[in-house]
Amino acid sequence: MNIGFLYIIIVMILLGISIPVGDYAMETIPVWLFTALTLTVSSIILLPAAKIYDKVVWKTLGTKYYYGIFMQALFTCVLYTVFLLYGLSYTNVIAAGVINSMVPAIVLLLSFLLLGERLNIRKIIAISLAVCAVLIMEVVGVRVVGEASWMGNIFMILAVTSLAMFYVYAKKFAVQIPPLTMSAGLCVMGLFMTLPMAVFESLTFDWESLTAITWAIIVAYAFSGWVLAYTFTYLGMPKVPASTVGMATAIIPVTATVFAVSFLGETLRVVDGVALVLVIISIFIAESKDNTDKALENSRMEGISYNSEEQVNETK
């Protein structure tokens, strides 16, 4: 297992934690306002960091790179986050986490169609197990019925589709711009896109309801869900295939479940346990390779890393 995949595992753990944290925040803060506040905090952290460590000159990036930053910000900072937070209003944390494991199937398909990555039996089996986990959660073990259940499902499916599109775009642009620069660009772009709705919600929001704990949650979400998650994403993406990143998203429901059960008092049912076991098995199947596959992939990744360093130097 190369260092890139370890970075991606850290990202998925952070995203898993962000689900119950976001669910808790939704009890007191509107969706758009919460998103804008967390992006503001992360932008304040990342902009100076990008200037100091990457020595970025923003005006030299060019239209192509700004387009890539804009699209990735749209898919994660805006669409994924907003759909996820709205979805949490209609479903529970554990179900939301497991629904996120649909991302591998969507990433695999998009990687094949848009990036030309090859399909194989191992990944198809792994995808099938991840999808089965979702079906078990949503058909056998559903807790919410009627309109609320359908609304939650729709929002969560839209969220995972947005996240899948982000990873496809991230794979395309990750090797061309330094990690902190990409992370800062996404947070700033996302802030501008969410600001109009956030301002609208702030006009009727009771600011006195924000306690010290709530502000701590906003800062923690910004640091883990944006600063660390984005930075590790762009450190890891050049070193692993996009389809492998998609499979790693199966870690999200495991983390979300453990956090929800440990700190939020959620109950882990038998059906939840079965779904999580399927998700874990899918990860091992997706990452199991024979020696020939490993040698070929390592050779290809070394070439990508070498090209990445040249592109970063040119960008600077």
Image: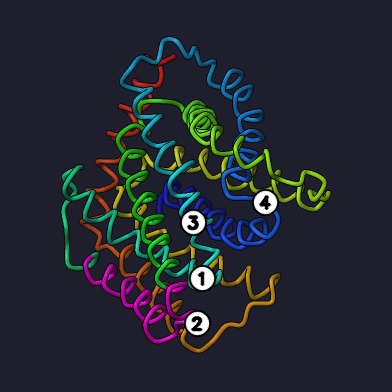
Q: What whole-number distance in Å separates the C-alpha atoms at marks 4 and 3?
A: 14 Å
Q: As displayed, is residue 43 above or below residue 133?
A: above
Q: Earlier in the sequence, mark 2 or mark 1?
A: 1
Q: Separation of disc 1 and disc 4 at Cα?
A: 18 Å
Residue 29 marker: 4
Earlier in the chain: of badge 2 and badge 3, it is: 3
- Image x and y of residue 283, in percent: 37, 67
Give the residue furthest to the front.
204
Three-letter amino acid code at the position of disc 3: Leu
Q: Residue at x 44, y 36 (%)?
A: 73
Check the picture and name the quadrant holding the C terminus: top left
Within 10 Å of the Cα at label 1, are there few (<14), some (14-19), or many (20+) other Cα atoms?
many
Q: Any mark on residue 143, and which?
A: 2
Upstream in the sequence, badge 1 or badge 3? Answer: 3
Report how far apart the C-alphas of labels 2 and 4 lie in the structure: 25 Å
Give above or below for 308 relative to 4: above
| Magenta-colored span | 124-149
Task: Kindly state the secondary structure of the residue where label 2 is placed.
Answer: loop
Please give the residue where the numbered disc 3 appears in the rendered image. Answer: 84
Residue 203 x/y as whole percent: 67, 38
Residue 70 falls in image quadrant: top left
Q: Is residue 153 magenta?
A: no
Dot 4 or dot 3, earlier in sequence: 4
Asked whether the beta carbons under mark 2 and mark 1 sit within 8 Å of each other, the answer is yes
Residue 91 badge: 1
